[in-house]
Image (tube, grey):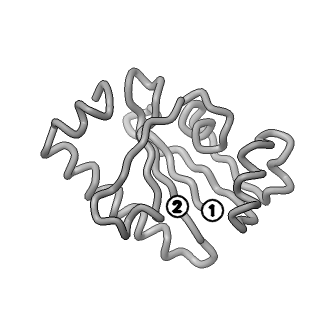
Amino acid sequence: MSDVGSREEAGESESVLDAFARDALTTLLDLTGVVRVGLAVTEGADRRLLFTSSDRLAAGDLDWCAIDATADVPLALAVRESRTTIGLLDDLEDAFPDFVTGQREAGIVGVAAVPLIGAGQSLGGVINL
């Protein structure tokens, strides 16, 4: 996948990705205390991430957006470095000040960003809020 347009043109690939995303987001959203779940998959030679979240499930078709894989947010870090980031917002504020501010405004208190690893490489990640 080189960009969002090519993913949309792929037809079958889009439905497989959407089906995986729906299942993953729904399953993770059922965890106790989870308010919102996000999913990112690598794209564009790992320079971008395709991102969607559980709050987009009700709209029918999942709405995907491209985000910079080098962004200073827990999910991009999880994908980029294959490293889990878990903590209360107070604990993560120094490392991710802008992200934490936005999550506080949404009523979130903690975050878990976990990489999705396959064949020894990061394929994406999930974030539970």
| 15 shown above or below 128 | above
- Where does residue 68 sit, x and y in percent of width and height? 53, 30
Q: Report if residue 123 is visible in the image.
A: no
Which of the two residues, 81 or 90, is positioned nearer the viewer here? 90
Disc 1: CA contacts within 10 A as few (<14), some (14-19) or many (>=20): some
| 126 shown above or below 77 | below
Residue occupying the point 38% across, 65% down = 57
- Where does residue 70 sit, x and y in percent of width and height? 59, 27
Q: Amino acid at mark 2?
A: Val
**Quarter of the N terminus within the rendering:** top left
Residue occupying the point 27% across, 49% down = 17
Asked if residue 114 lies left or right of residue 17, the reply is right
Residue at the spot of label 2: 37
Q: Report if residue 61 is visible in the image.
A: yes
Which of the two residues, 82 or 70, is positioned nearer the viewer here? 70
Alpha carbon distance from label 1 to label 2: 6 Å
Residue at the spot of label 1: 129
- Where does residue 5 sit, x and y in percent of width and height? 26, 32
The reply to whether dot 1 and dot 2 touch (C-beta < 8 Å) is yes
Asked if residue 20 lies left or right of residue 51, the reply is left
Q: Residue furthest left?
A: 12
> N-terminal of the two: label 1 or label 2?
2
